Amino acid sequence: MRFRLTYQGELRSNQRDPQNGQRDRLAEHKQSIRKIFHGQLKQLWQTNKFLSEHTVDPNAWFSTNAIPANQVGQPGFWGGGPEPEQLPLSEAIANLHRENGYRFVPLVRENFSLLCSLDILFLRRDFGHGVISSGDLDNRIKTLIDALRKPHNANELGGNESPASGEDPFYCLLEDDDLVTGLSVQADMLLDPPVADQPARALSEVKLVISVEIKPSHVTMFNLSFA
């Protein structure tokens, strides 16, 4: 499966990860970016034939959070009577990720045996001295990757303790950033003129085009649709 995500706006540098339960000073910033990707991924789930039409047996899904990869999306077992009502795939995932007042729908999940690679066109105003000497490009990419995954805890919601309208469920690309197995970045100059009344944001503003490729780590009957 291949598709593109886009982002234009401020992208701040993530200097270090919070330790021992510390509050992430960029949590609100990351959540604001996460909301933008939510809208794009929601559209993907609504328009992709497999994602929008695939249903699962909730009895099989809700019996455990550790679903064997070869059973994902397969019919469950029941003792006679009518077949259980099938649940849309997004709803099944959301009900497995009820966390901190949200229901998250990460597309790339370990239980799906899925991995992804990212190819990023990174347009920025401070371009001109190469990727290495530009200083904090790696740290800004770290901010981006954090915004592509679901929050790990309530501290990462950054003041967004309740989902806004249209955010239940809340769509994310990644269950965890460990599922990103390939990353390439091409940097270039952002030529859009800066907003006149926001000079402080000029150097941190970026335009990103993120090409996402999702592949199974090993193929099952379910994730064959991603191959």
Image (cartoon, helix red, strand yellow):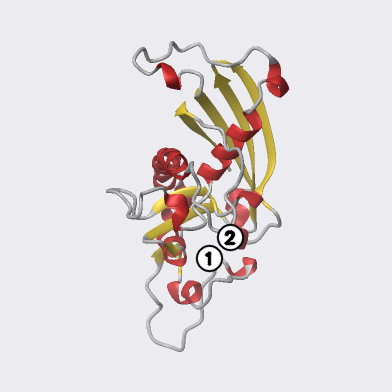
Quarter of the figure with the N terminus? top right
**Is residue 28 toward the left or the right of residue 120 in the image?**
left
The amino acid type, in three-letter code, at marker 1 is Gly
Q: Position of residue 93 (x, y in %)?
A: 46, 61
Compared to residue 39, the image places residue 85 above or below, namely: below
The quarter holding residue 137 reads: top right
Left of 28 or right of it: where is 134? Answer: right
Label 2 environment density (alpha carbons within 10 Å; few <14, some 14–19, many ≥20):
some
Quarter of the image holding residue 35?
top left
Mark sitting earlier along the chain (2/1): 1
The residue shown at (42%, 66%) is 95
Residue at the far bottom: name it.
79
Residue 155 image position (x, y, % from top left): 46, 54
Identify the residue under disc 1. Answer: 73
Q: Nearer the viewer, residue 147 or 211?
A: 147
Q: Which residue is mark 2?
A: 222
Q: CA distance from mark 2 to mark 1?
A: 6 Å
Q: Nearer the viewer, residue 224 or 139?
A: 139
Observer-nearest residue: 160 or 104?
160
| Residue 16 image point, x, y percent | 61, 42
- Determine the secondary structure under disc 1: loop
Q: Residues within 10 Å of mark 1 (few under 14, many from 20)?
A: many
Residue drawn at the location 61% of the way across and 17% of the way down: 188
Label disc, if present, on residue 95 of the rendered structure: none
Point out residue 130 in the picture as x, y percentages from the top left corner.
Answer: 70, 17
> Which residue: 43% across, 10% down?
193
With respect to residue 210, does 76 lie above or below? Answer: below
Residue 84, relative to residue 207: is it above or below? Answer: below
Q: Are marks 2 and 1 in contact (CB under 8 Å)?
A: yes
